[in-house]
Structure formats: structure tokens, C-alpha cells
Image (tube, rainbow, N blue to C red):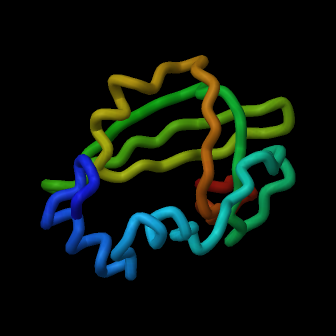
Amino acid sequence: MYLKGVGPRKAALLNKLNIFTFYDFLMHFPRNYEDEREVTPIDEIEVDDIAIVVGYISNIESRRVRNNLSMINAIIEDDTDYVRVTWFNQDYLLKKLETGMKLMIKGKVSAYGYSNIYSI
């Protein structure tokens, strides 16, 4: 609580993580690490896997699904294939995403429709 930037409110949040001293803070490590260096080519992704894909946006579209639910779909392509990416209720991304932009996407792969089209 006596560190710069740590007041009573933030100290209470840190206490919930069993962090009471500066030493506790230094010795608090994440419970797991994610290696984002393992990029999977799109033609090798499998349903229900968590995949990291790097590719270029070839198409972006947005639509309202219900009154308060928006959905952004983009097609990401690499040298091997393409995959559909979906974001829900993230309208600000429309201002940031552009056709031709290179992206690294990480997410759970699901089958889309009845063909070999996958979605992340």
C-alpha cells in the first residue's frame, strides 16, 4: 500500500492474490505461459484446437445479429488456405481493420457450416 501508485483500493485487490509485501509482488508469477511463436498454417488447423494463424485480411463485413449484438467477420488468408474470423460486440475494430492488413490471430477453431471451412 505504500508503493507509489498503490493505494488502499489497489492494495485490497493485491491482497486477494496473496500479495502483501513487495517481495510477494516480485515472486508472483503467472500460472501459465503461452508460447505464441508456434504459428500454424491455415491448412493444418484442426477443429477444437487453439491455433495461432498469421495471414492477410481479404474481406471484412459487419452486421447486427440482434438489437444489442454486433458481429464482425473477416477472411484471413495465408499461402495455404483461408479461415473466417469472428468478433462479437467489438465495433471499434471496424476502424482499425483494413483489407490487406497482416494479422496474427489466436483462438479456438470451430467448423463452420457443413464444408471444410473453419472459423476462429
Across and down, in percent, residue 67 comes to 14, 55
Q: In the shown orientation, is residue 18 left or right of residue 40?
A: left
Residue under the point 79% across and 39% down: 81
Let me know if residue 95 appears in the view. Answer: yes
Of residues 33 and 108, the one drawn nearer to the viewer in this rendering: 33
Above or below, 32 relative to 89:
below
Above or below, 15 relative to 90:
below
Residue under the point 63% across and 25% down: 102
Residue under the point 61% across and 32% down: 103
Above or below, 97 relative to 5:
above
Of residues 4 and 102, the one drawn nearer to the viewer in this rendering: 4
Across and down, in percent, residue 82 comes to 72, 40
Across and down, in percent, residue 51 comes to 71, 56
Of residues 56 and 114, the one drawn nearer to the viewer in this rendering: 56
Number of marks drawn = 0
Quarter placement of the C terminus: bottom right
Of residues 67 and 52, the one drawn nearer to the viewer in this rendering: 52
Across and down, in percent, residue 56 comes to 66, 27
Q: In the shown orientation, is residue 36 left or right of residue 29?
A: right
Q: In the shown orientation, is residue 57 left or right of residue 20?
A: right
Quarter placement of the N terminus: bottom left
Residue 33 position by quadrant: bottom right
Q: In the shown orientation, is residue 29 left or right of residue 88?
A: right
Residue 119 position by quadrant: bottom right
Above or below, 87 relative to 94:
below
Residue under the point 38% across and 81% down: 18
Residue 6 position by quadrant: bottom left
